[in-house]
Image (cartoon, grey):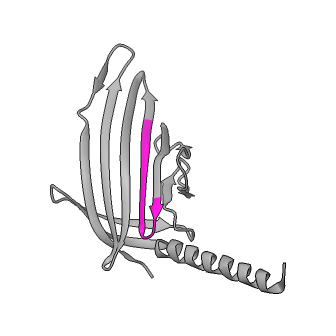
Amino acid sequence: MTMHHLVSIAAIVWVLAVSGSTEAGELTGAWKGALTSADGSRAEIQIDFSPQGLPLYSYTNNKGVTRQVELSHVGQTVEYVPPGGGVQRMAVKRFEKAQGRLAVSIIGSFERASQGYMDQRQEAALFEYTLVPEGLKMRVTTRTASHFGDKDMIVGGDPSSVVAEGVLQRLR
């Protein structure tokens, strides 16, 4: 290879690296704002993204230590013991990333046994992020089901579904 070919290849690699980091750079850092659901309830939230543009899943374990895990691929699982005991599991079921857009679907479950009773909850959540001129549009769709029982009987709660959305602003 001549020096000209090497310089050309290096220039192409540099352009790809810069364009890739520009895309990732759009969804980096911390974003804050309010999400509103159809019933009018509001929740203030903060979402953090890694330098690679991937969402960070934050949780607090039973020792009170807050941790963050970068959600990066389908099949990824996070398991921990939350404050108060039990076991919390979360798995990534869908991960789609495009220019200025990201969608992550997770399935979570919580189980705790105490004095012969079992408390189980399952939640599916789809997080959709889209960069818009006003900031970062976020839409969250959750579906929750719970069960409570003992060795003789299990009582299921009514499944519920919530959709909330809003536009978040980048924190400086």
The answer to which image quadrant residue 127 occupies is bottom left
Position of 66 with respect to 119 (left or right) is right
Work out which residue is located at the far top of the displayed protein and give it: 152
Identify the main secondary structure in magenta.
strand
The answer to which image quadrant residue 20 occupies is bottom right
Q: Which residues are magenta?
A: 97-110
Spot occupied by residue 139 in the image (x, y as percentages of width and height): 31, 60
Q: Nearer the viewer, residue 12 or 150?
A: 12
Q: Which residue is located at x 38 percent, y 64 percent?
A: 129
Is residue 62 depicted above or below 3 in this figure?
above
Q: Which residue is located at x 38 percent, y 37 percent?
A: 122
Is residue 154 depicted above or below 172 in this figure?
above
**Is 23 covered by the magenta stretch?**
no
Spot occupied by residue 126 in the image (x, y as percentages of width and height): 36, 51
Spot occupied by residue 46 in the image (x, y as percentages of width and height): 39, 67
Q: Quadrant of the N terminus?
A: bottom right
Q: Which residue is located at x 53 percent, y 53 percent?
A: 64
Is residue 98 depicted above or below 111 in this figure?
below
Position of 102 with respect to 160 (left or right) is right
Q: Nearer the viewer, residue 100 or 9?
A: 9
Is residue 119 depicted above or below 81 in this figure?
above
Q: Quadrant of the C terminus?
A: bottom left
